[in-house]
Amino acid sequence: METKKQKTWVIIAIIILGIIAFLIPNQIAAQTGIKRTDLQKHDLSIPGRETVQAKIDFDGHTAFGQHSHPGEEIIYVLEGSLEYEVEGQAPVTLKAGEVLFIPAGVVHSARNNTNVKASELATYIVEKGKPVLVMKK
């Protein structure tokens, strides 16, 4: 009888942890002032590749930490200005209308150093079925 109760509590704990794990990324984004809006996702004519396009909004003085992607990222700054740190390169600040190319697997980060909102259009050409974002530990 005791073993059955223990199994039940273990199952309940796993369910609760699963729910928490699902909600945490959205909560982190909400707390950091960064909002990602997925716009489109399509298979490419290249086998095993897809394109994903998203708009990322940064509130003033917010940053998205070091991360990489399993494919190329093409960035177009829509409004405001954003500072990008790309592994192996000097930091660069881009303003609305400027672009940046980030090769596959290269660690990078983005920061809004101003008091006003900034936004980028991010287009990823990635391996199909893999997560678009890989956070650096």
Image: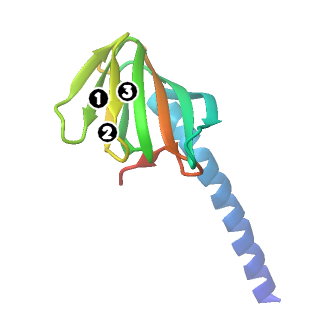
The reply to whether the C-beta atoms of the residues labelled 1 and 2 are less than 8 Å apart is yes
Tell me if 69 is positioned left or right of 16 in this view: left
Question: Nearer the N terminus, badge 1 or badge 2?
Answer: 1
User: Which residue position is annotated with label 2?
Assistant: 108
Question: Relative to 24, is 6 on the left or the right?
Answer: right
Q: Is residue 126 above or below residue 91?
A: below
Splitting the image into 4 quarters, where does residue 66 fall? top left
- Residue 71, given in percent of the width and then of the height, sits at 44, 43
Q: Residues within 10 Å of mark 3 (few under 14, many from 20)?
A: many
Front-lying residue, 53 or 59 = 53
Residue linked to disc 3? 62
Image point (59%, 39%), residue name? 45
Q: Is residue 92 left or right of residue 42?
A: left
Residue 57 in picture, x, y percent from top left: 48, 22
Of circles 2 and 3, the one toward us is 2
Indicate the secondary structure of the residue bearing disc 3. Answer: loop
Image disc number at residue 84: 1
Residue 63 visible at all: yes
Q: Quick one: 14 or 9, which is closer to the camera?
A: 14
The kind of residue on which mark 2 rests is: His
Task: Tell me which numbered mark, 2 or 3, is placed earlier along the sequence.
Answer: 3
Residue reaching furthest left? 90
At label 1, the amino acid type is: Tyr
Can residue 111 be seen here? The reply is no
